[in-house]
Each structure stands twice: as structure tokens, then as C-alpha cells.
Image: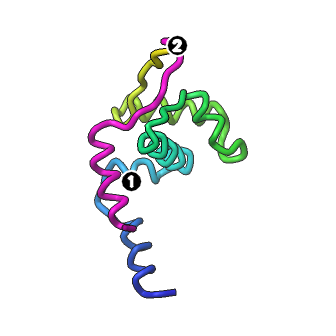
Amino acid sequence: MEKKNFNILDELISHDLEIIKYFQSDITKYKLLILVFKNYYDQGFQTIEDIIEKLPRDMSSRAHKLSCITDLTVKGYLIKEPLNSDLRKKCLKPSKNLIEEFDKYIKIVG
């Protein structure tokens, strides 16, 4: 493996991006981060239920997944927005601060 690859790995875990570090503290939160940004870049916002279904069942319980979503929205990292077609259903979007940090985080590997 090239030395450059080791440097990238070091940067991915030793950065100073506080919001990203918070997501990295729990595998469920980190996977939520990846799914929310995949949806954000695809402009295909999925409901919270759809996102929970995409998280592996053996990774964490449904209750833990919902708890993580609640925690991340209370902290203001993720934003719940109602769908236009059904106001009872909510989708998750990244906050402005999270978008800014994630862009910096992605540049580490780019």
C-alpha cells in the first residue's frame, strides 16, 4: 500500500471537523451521514422510514436508529422536513453547517 493511502487514512480519523467527529462516534450515525448525503447529492430525499430500512438490520435496533435521528435533529445537524405529497412523512436533510463540514471531509479523499 502506498504511503499516500496511509496519509489519507490518518486524515480521515484525525481531522478537526467536530460535527463529522460526532457522526463517527457511532456506526449508525456514520451510516446515517452517508445515506443522507447520498440522498442530498442525488436530490432524492427519502423518508425517515426509507432511510431506516436502508440501514442494515444487524447493525443496530430500530429504536437505536430512531434515537440517533432524534439526537442528530435536536443538535441541528439534520433537519426533518415534511414531504409535499404527504405532510405526515418526514425526510432528512443536512444542515448548512453539516454540508460545509462534509465538503471539507470529502476533500480529504479527493
Position of residue 30 measured from the top left corner of the image (x, y, whole percent): 50, 49
Q: Position of residue 89 (x, y in %)?
A: 53, 18
Element at label 1: helix
The one nearer the camera, 44 or 14, is 44
Q: Is residue 110 left or right of residue 56?
A: left
**Does 104 lie within the magenta span?**
yes
Quadrant (top left/top right/bottom left/bottom right) for the C terminus: bottom left
- Seen in the picture, residue 26 relative to 8 is either above or below; the reply is above
Measured as percent of width and height from the top left, residue 60 is found at 65, 42
Q: Is residue 59 magenta?
A: no
Which residue: 48% across, 12% down? 87
For the residues bearing labels 1 and 2, Cβ distance under 8 angstroms: no
For label 1, the residue is 21
Query: Whole-percent x and y of residue 41?
Result: 42, 44
Q: Which region is colored magenta? A: 86-110
User: Residue at the location (50% across, 44% down)?
Assistant: 29
Which dot marks residue 86?
A: 2
